[in-house]
Amino acid sequence: MQFSKTAIALLLGCIVLLGPMMDVVHSFELSKAAACAEVAAGAGAAGLSGAVPIVKALITCSEYKATKTNVQDPTDLFLLIGNFVQKVMRKPSCVSDAVLSAQKVLASHVDKLFAAKCFN
């Protein structure tokens, strides 16, 4: 099999560029990555299921009333979200309650991520 000079140059270039990364590759543990991905997926699922009640509580707490309920394009949606965020930010106690609620939902998952040493 014959290689062109270009193919050999590309191969040598890849070796030179990727050589320093080989230590990272050798220290990568697939089982640890899988465990961390599983915990992260659980945290994501918990966060998504907890988001709806938290947003509903924010709406109630901030007494938000949408001026336009018929969203027809992305601009309308972002204006609606922006108005909601402005209204919520005027009531710091609402934001504090929402953060505490999110903490309650996610705390056990964050603890599991640290226990599995996913951040090393």
Image: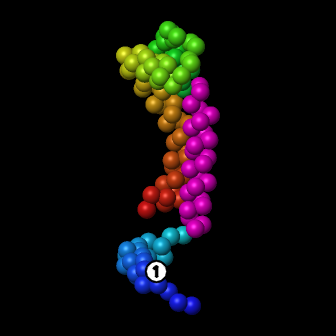
Query: What secondary structure is marked by label 1?
Result: helix
Q: Looking at this view, is 114 or 54 the one in front?
A: 54
Quadrant of the frame with the N terminus: bottom right
Asked whether, in this view, residue 93 is left or right of residue 54, the answer is: left
Image quarter for residue 55? top right
Question: Is residue 48 one of those drawn in magenta?
Answer: yes
Q: Residues within 10 Å of mark 1 (few under 14, many from 20)?
A: few
Res 117 visible:
yes
Res 23 visible:
no
Asked whether, in this view, residue 51 is left or right of residue 85, the answer is: right
Q: Residue furthest bottom?
A: 1
Q: Looking at this view, is 61 or 20 the one in front?
A: 20
Tag 1: amino acid: Ala
Give the residue at x 51% y 25%. 74
Quadrant of the frame with the C terminus: bottom left
Secondary structure predominantly adopted by residues drawn in magenta: helix
Write down the region rendered in magenta: 30-53
- What is the x, y in percent for residue 105? 56, 37
Q: Is residue 83 shown above or below 100?
A: above
Number of marks in the image? 1
Q: Is residue 73 shown above or below 20?
A: above
Give the residue at x 62% y 34%. 49
